[in-house]
Amino acid sequence: MPETLVTIPEGEMTLEGLHQPGKGLEAAVICHPHPLYGGDMGNNVVSILQEVLEEWGWGTLRFNFRGVGGSGGRHDGGRGEVDDLLAAVDYLERQGVTAVHLAAYSFGVWIGLKALQQGLQPASAILVSPPLDFLDFAGLRLPAAPCLVAAGDRDGFCAAGSLVRWLAAQAPGKERVDVQILRGCDHFYWNQGDLLAVRIREFLQLRLPPQPAG
């Protein structure tokens, strides 16, 4: 079944999303990169996340933050975007999903971690290229759930040293975190999507229970 274009209520406006029901009651909400730099739910890394997680058996919901594509409103510097993410999670739960996983890339990671401060409790998190050298991650913590943090060794927005220092400040609970530094990859993963997909699959197989057969 292909992804279906859906409308997500968010206060007095709506967001557009693409929803793919899964094989069970688990689903991933997928957050795209920075809207002011061309980020949207059609981004190449967002598409990789959707394809791998659908293959794994989860439902998926990728959506456009406010002011992007067919979503209402306008960019809000990260404040309203947290509300957008929580609205997307609420949409999944109203579809009967009982375990919501977080998958996010770049700006989307920042929003996802900020949403934890507003009560989001994902069953797991796949966090690709947190832009530690571009946005303020001070005080943001990883969820109390299995996490994958992946970044390229040529990432100008997430230097390896910045990532090491930020992860060191996450204790306790670092045993839940798998860190993958992908050789030859920059922030955008052009022509490197297959390597990222492999690392995500390895994380799923290692950390999470197998999904039922279709």
Image (cartoon, rainbow, N blue to C red):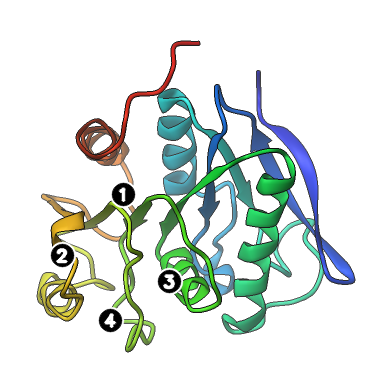
- Do the numbered discs 1 and 4 sit on residues whose CB atoms are within 8 Å? no
Q: CA distance from mark 1 to mark 4?
A: 17 Å
Q: Give, as a three-letter code, the residue at label 1.
A: Tyr
Q: Of the numbered discs in the image, which one, if any, rests on residue 174?
A: 2
Q: Of the numbered discs in the image, which one, if any, rests on residue 189?
A: 1
User: How many residues crowd around disc 2 within 10 Å: few (fewer than 14), some, or many (20 or more)?
Assistant: some
Q: Position of residue 184 (x, y in %)?
A: 13, 50
Q: Of the numbered discs in the image, which one, if any, rests on residue 133?
A: 4
| Mark closer to the chain start, 3 or 1 | 3
Q: Position of residue 21 (x, y in %)?
A: 64, 29
According to the image, label 3 marks what residue? 113
Relative height, residue 133 to residue 173 (above, below) = below
Relative height, residue 112 to residue 213 (above, below) = below
| Mark closer to the chain start, 1 or 4 | 4
At x 61% / y 83%, what residue is drawn? Answer: 79
Q: Give, as a three-letter code, the residue at label 3.
A: Leu
Q: Secondary structure at mark 4?
A: loop
- Do the numbered discs 2 and 3 sit on residues whose CB atoms are within 8 Å? no
| Mark closer to the chain start, 4 or 2 | 4
